DNA sequence: GCAATGACGCTCT
DNA sequence: CAGAGCGCCATTG
């Protein structure tokens, strides 16, 4: 059973455009849950693999892929990002200064 | 309702 | 920027 609060988070993640990435904190804030970055990660963790949510576009505040229970899954995320043109550096992180998702104020209101 | 858990963020070093 | 430590809080047992 997925909590209703997660729906809000999924909704934000769905809006992340290809070739762009957002941080957990950013997603939390856009979802109307400022400071609940952990719940964002928790929500994505409970996300089924067959989901259409672009969860791979969500990274931590440093642009890196957080280690999760199943190692190797981060490799998948790296592949999905590369497929969208997001190149990762040697540290396995993305240049946030360039690919950080910047949503316009008007775009947020159109929810 | 209490205690433990966790795909994190912020601050200091 | 990278690493270590502390804090926040919904979800779960």
Image (tube, coloured by chain):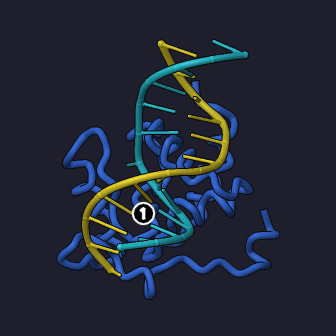
Chain colours: A blue, B cyan, C yellow
Above or below for A44 versus B12: above
Q: In the picture, residue A6 is in which quadrant?
A: top right
- Tag 1 residue: A59
Counting labels gives: 1
The residue lying furthest to the bottom in this view is A98
| Residue A98: x %, y % from top left | 43, 87
| Residue C1: x %, y % from top left | 32, 80
Disc 1: CA contacts within 10 A as few (<14), some (14-19) or many (>=20) = many
Residue at point 76%, 79% (across, down): A105
In the rendered structure, the answer to whether residue A94 lies left or right of residue A11 reads left
In the rendered structure, the answer to whether residue A73 lies left or right of residue A106 reads left
Which chain's residue wears label 1?
A
In the picture, the quarter occupied by the C terminus of chain A is bottom right
In the rendered structure, the answer to whether residue B9 lies left or right of residue A72 reads right
Above or below for A51 versus A99: above
In the picture, the quarter occupied by the N terminus of chain A is top right
Above or below for A49 versus A75: above
Above or below for A31 versus A106: above
Q: Nearer the viewer, residue A35 or A14?
A: A35
| Residue B2: x %, y % from top left | 63, 17
Residue at point 38%, 40% (across, down): A49
Residue at point 70%, 53% (across, down): A33
Helix, strand or loop for disc 1? strand
| Residue C4: x %, y % from top left | 30, 57
């Amino acid at each position: 059973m997925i909590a209703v609060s997660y729906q809000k988070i999924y909704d934000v993640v769905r809006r992340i455009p290809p070739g762009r990435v957002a941080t957990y904190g950013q997603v939390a804030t856009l979802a109307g849950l400022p400071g609940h970055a952990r719940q964002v990660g928790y929500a994505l963790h409970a996300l089924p693999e067959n989901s259409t949510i672009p969860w791979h576009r969500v990274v931590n505040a440093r642009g890196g892929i957080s280690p999760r229970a199943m190692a190797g899954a981060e490799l998948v995320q790296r592949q999905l990002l590369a497929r969208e043109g997001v190149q990762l550096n040697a540290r396995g992180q993305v240049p946030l200064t360039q690919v950080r998702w910047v949503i316009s104020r008007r775009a947020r209101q159109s929810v």
